[in-house]
Every structure is written in structure tokens, then in C-alpha cells.
């Protein structure tokens, strides 16, 4: 009797962490799954009009259809390409401006207050102007994305460079580091955590801007796909487009987290996580 | 062993430091006024005094981090105008770069064969095997050892120490004293130790200078045998009392 209970305890102890791990891995999915089931039932029983809110299975069918005829991949790639070109241009400029203004006072005096002023204009308010400038072509959309990502990267890079411990900079100069080595080995790696925060914000703005830009005028891309589907009352495709945006956003976030874990290995926060995660 | 033997530099040796009629003030506060001090090559000098007595200013002048308002600071007979390449500083905090591994911190200035040199310097301070650790996993004493290795890797002829052991616990501090004494004995660089710990000054230095309100209140030779043990040597206790009276 005593033996079995001991054995039972031992077995319980070895299995417990696995169950706990599985449970905490599944927990974030519980609510979405329940919602999906409720939604499906509501659509099937006619509680909501299927034309306005099609059932998840209908959307899944739309997904499958568009996957087979290649249109989903085509539109997703078109959107992703725009997003990335805009990110590289706007983010690159934001990074350079942030480093320059962070390191060099005259540049800050000259540019920062202007940038802070421009920053407060919602960049989507520029759409009419952008259409007048660039027409409704590719340039207009990339321009909008570039503006959308510029400011989060600029501000966080600037802040990251400015927040470098002056004691480390003094140490580096006492130990004979020249300016290039100082920037490469002390300032940029030190600003990196802040720059990555900026990147995460920028990725959010990137998709947001793209959604709006693509619904205005486009001949491809997820935004075009959903607007086109609206014309034909294909609510399932509209919802599919929204879901694709959500997934792309999530993907971007996962990618930045992976980058953070990789480049911030020195950071105590990431070391603890590496050893301590179940 | 006589003290003279310890002053004979073996490898890089030391450089003499001289301050002549140095004036330095910050705003209206006159930190150093008509200040004169000669430090012979290879000497281990401790500068003791209250906070705000001008200790750190003195060190920043010698390091070339600040310039005097007037007067002359010289190293090896040449006027100090900027950071001198053979002067190294140990700060109160270790000031390790968190995103560089221990060996990269020691070899922060890089240069040819930096990894071998940094590895040797780490071995000198008793940290072999920790080359690839991140600074965040080290204890306070280990961090200061890494900082010491970083200072030693370029074979400096002058080592300036700005209360580098102040934040360490008593046992670690004694370990660091022995380590520093051993390395200084071997290399013979000129050393200036800023401290407010009188016992530390007597345990390590050849000579103690007490700074008070920007002037030298006491300049005393510490003529004790080396290696020193921080036990209650009656002569050491007597010296400590004399210094304390002047502080």
C-alpha cells in the first residue's frame, strides 16, 4: 500500500512538468478555439447572417481555394514585397538619422525639432498629397510605408545612442579606441536593444500603412484582394484577407523576437530566459 | 629583501610623474591650488583624503582626461596634453562592456595578437577559463579582475587606480591587494592609488600622500617589508594613526 503510493507519487512527479508544459503551451490557444467553435455554431444555426459573417469552415474553404489557384500566394507576396521595400528604405533612413543625431549635436540641433514636428502628422493624412505626387502606383504605397516605419526606428535609435553609459565611452577613450571602434563596439551594440524595440513598433506601422494604402488603389496585394472580394460580396475572402494580415503581423513579431534572442545573448534578461523556460 | 629591489623595473618598468604649480578649479571652487608633487618611476603612491579633497581631480589630470587651468603635468619629462598611451586607469566600477565577452573586454583595444595577450593577462589575474563568459555572470571581484587584466594587457608604465576596491567585500579586497602587489612587484609600473581606506594605503603603498582641501597635508614613506600581510604590524598601526590624524 505504502509502496504503491510512493510509486504513484514518483510517477506523478515525473509526468507533472510535461503536463504543465503542455498546458501552458496550449493555454493561449484556448480562447481563440472556443471563439471559433461558438462562431461556427452561430453561423450554422443562422444566428448571424452567413453573408455578413461566414462560418470559419467557409473561410477555410476560401483559403483552400485561393491557395490552390495560387492567388493567395501571389497577393501575399505582392504585399510582403511592398512592405519590405518600404521597411528597408524608411527604416534605413530612420536608423541613419537616429545614429547621426544621437552622435552629433549639430545634427540634432538642426534636424530633431523638425522631425519631432513632422512626426506628429498622422502619416495616413498624407494620402491625398501622396496620390497627387506619385499617382496611385507602387511608389505611393512604398513611400507611405517608408514614412510609417521611419519614425519608430528613428526615435528609438536616437534614444538608444543617447542612453549609452558615458562611463563606458570614457573607458573606451582611455583605452585608446578610435571613433570608428567606439561606434562599432560600444555605441551600436549598446543601442541595439532600443533599436529592436523600434523595429517591432515599425513592423506594426508597416502592416497598418500597407493595409490602408492597398485598399485605396492597387492591382494586387492582400488589400486589393479584400477590396475586390467586397465588390462581389465574397465576405469569406474579406475575412481571409484580414486573417492573413494578422498572421503576417504575428510572423513579423516572432521574427523580431528571434532576432532579439540571438543578438542580445549577453543581456541578463535573455540568459535567464534561456535556462529558465520550461 | 630590500625595497630598492622592488623598484628595479623588469619588463616595461615605470615612468615618473610630476605636477608643478598646478591650478584647477571648477567654477568658483578651487580644487587644486599651486599644487606640486613628484612621483618617481616605479613608485607605489597612495593618495588619501576626504571626498571632495581633490583626489579624483588629481587623477584625471595625470590621466589627461582633464587639463589644468595653469601649471604643468608631466609624464616621463613630457607635458601631458592628451591621454598618454602608457597610462591605464582602473575605475571605481569595473566598466566592462556588457555585450563583449570577458576576453573581448580585456582586449578592448584589439591590435595584433590581442587574443593571446588578453588570455595571458586573464591568467595573470587568475581568471583562466573564463574567457568566453559574459560580464553579467561574474562577481564584483571577478569583474575588477577583468578590469585589471584589461589595464595590464598593454603593459602600462603607469597605472592609476580610482578606489577600485571600495565596493568589494573585505575578503575579496584583501585578495585583490595581494594580486595587485604581486603584479606590481613583477612589472614595476608607477602606481597611483586613490583611496579613503587608510589601511589599504598602508598595506600597498611605498608612500602615502594625504590631500586636504587641495593641498598636501602629509607626505609619508611606508617603509615596511614586502610582501605585506595585513595583520596588526605595530609599525603599520602607527603609520595608520599618523595618516588618520592628517586626514
Image (cartoon, rainbow, N blue to C red):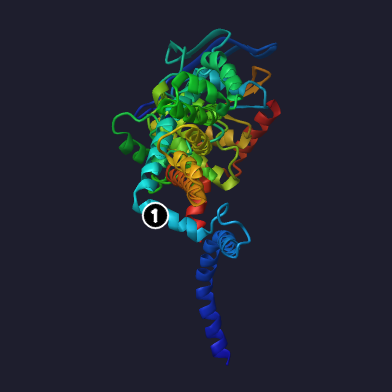
Q: Which residue lies furthest to the front in this view?
A: A232
Which quarter of the image is occupied by the N terminus of chain A?
bottom right
- Residue A90, given in percent of the width and then of the height, sits at 46, 27
Q: Which residue lies furthest to the top in this view?
A: B70
Q: Is residue A173 above or below residue A201?
A: above
What residue does disc 1 label? Answer: A65
**Residue at position x 51%, y 57% in the image:** A276
Q: Dot 1 lies on which element?
A: helix
Q: Nearer the viewer, residue A56 or A172?
A: A56
- Residue A220, given in percent of the width and then of the height, sits at 40, 38
Q: Which of A162 and B230 is in front in this view?
A: A162
**Residue at position x 39%, y 47% in the image:** A72
Does residue B39 appear in this view? Answer: no
Q: Nearer the viewer, residue B138 or B32?
A: B138
Chain at tag 1: A
- Residue A205, given in percent of the width and then of the height, sits at 53, 35
Does residue A248 appear in this view? Answer: yes
Amino acid at each position: 500500500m505504502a509502496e504503491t503510493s510512493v510509486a504513484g507519487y514518483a510517477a506523478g512527479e515525473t509526468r507533472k512538468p510535461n503536463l504543465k508544459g503542455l498546458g501552458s503551451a496550449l493555454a493561449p490557444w484556448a480562447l481563440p478555439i472556443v471563439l471559433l467553435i461558438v462562431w461556427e455554431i452561430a453561423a450554422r444555426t443562422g444566428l448571424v447572417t452567413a453573408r455578413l459573417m461566414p462560418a470559419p469552415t467557409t473561410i477555410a474553404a476560401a483559403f483552400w481555394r485561393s491557395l490552390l489557384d495560387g492567388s493567395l500566394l501571389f497577393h501575399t507576396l505582392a504585399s510582403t514585397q511592398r512592405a519590405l521595400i518600404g521597411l528597408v528604405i524608411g527604416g534605413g533612413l530612420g536608423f541613419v538619422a537616429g545614429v547621426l543625431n544621437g552622435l552629433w549635436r549639430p545634427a540634432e540641433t538642426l534636424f530633431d525639432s523638425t522631425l519631432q514636428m513632422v512626426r506628429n502628422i498622422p502619416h495616413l493624412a498624407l494620402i491625398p498629397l501622396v496620390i497627387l505626387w506619385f499617382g496611385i502606383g507602387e511608389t505611393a504605397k512604398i513611400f507611405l510605408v517608408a514614412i510609417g516605419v521611419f519614425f519608430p526606428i528613428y526615435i528609438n535609435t536616437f534614444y538608444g545612442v543617447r542612453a549609452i553609459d558615458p562611463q563606458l565611452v570614457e573607458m573606451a577613450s582611455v583605452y585608446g579606441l578610435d571613433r570608428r571602434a567606439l561606434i562599432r563596439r560600444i555605441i551600436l551594440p549598446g543601442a541595439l536593444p532600443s533599436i529592436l524595440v523600434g523595429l517591432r513598433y515599425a513592423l506594426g506601422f508597416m502592416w497598418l500603412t500597407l493595409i490602408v494604402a492597398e485598399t485605396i488603389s492597387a492591382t494586387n496585394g492582400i488589400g486589393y484582394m479584400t477590396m475586390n472580394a467586397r465588390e462581389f460580396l465574397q465576405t469569406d475572402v474579406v475575412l481571409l484577407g484580414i486573417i492573413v494580415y494578422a498572421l503576417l503581423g504575428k510572423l513579423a513579431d516572432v521574427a523580431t523576437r528571434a532576432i532579439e534572442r540571438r543578438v542580445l545573448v549577453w543581456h541578463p534578461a535573455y540568459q535567464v530566459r534561456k535556462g529558465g523556460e520550461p | 629583501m630590500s625595497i630598492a629591489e622592488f623598484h628595479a623595473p623588469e619588463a616595461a618598468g615605470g615612468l615618473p610623474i610630476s605636477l608643478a604649480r598646478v591650478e584647477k578649479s571648477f567654477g568658483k571652487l578651487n580644487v587644486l591650488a599651486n599644487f606640486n608633487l613628484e612621483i618617481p618611476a616605479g613608485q607605489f603612491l597612495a593618495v588619501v583624503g576626504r571626498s571632495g579633497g581633490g583626489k579624483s581631480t588629481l587623477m584625471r589630470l595625470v590621466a589627461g582626461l582633464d587639463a589644468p587651468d595653469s601649471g604643468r603635468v608631466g609624464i616621463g619629462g613630457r607635458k601631458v596634453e592628451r591621454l598618454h598611451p602608457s597610462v591605464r586607469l582602473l575605475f571605481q566600477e569595473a566598466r566592462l562592456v556588457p555585450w563583449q565577452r570577458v576576453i573581448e573586454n580585456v582586449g578592448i583595444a584589439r591590435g595584433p595578437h590581442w587574443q593571446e595577450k588578453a588570455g595571458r593577462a586573464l591568467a595573470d589575474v587568475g581568471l583562466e577559463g573564463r574567457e568566453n563568459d559574459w560580464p553579467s555572470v561574474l562577481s564584483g571581484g571577478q569583474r575588477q579582475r577583468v578590469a585589471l587584466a584589461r589595464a595590464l594587457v598593454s603593459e602600462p608604465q603607469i597605472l592609476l587606480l580610482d578606489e577600485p576596491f571600495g565596493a568589494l567585500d573585505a575578503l575579496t579586497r584583501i585578495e585583490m591587494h595581494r594580486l595587485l602587489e604581486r603584479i606590481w612587484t613583477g612589472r614595476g609600473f608607477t602606481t597611483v592609488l586613490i583611496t579613503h581606506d587608510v589601511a589599504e594605503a598602508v598595506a600597498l603603498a611605498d608612500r602615502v600622500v594625504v590631500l586636504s582641501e587641495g593641498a598636501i597635508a602629509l607626505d609619508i614613506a611606508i617603509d615596511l617589508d614586502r610582501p605585506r600581510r595585513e595583520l596588526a604590524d605595530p609599525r603599520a598601526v602607527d603609520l595608520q594613526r599618523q595618516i588618520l590624524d592628517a586626514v
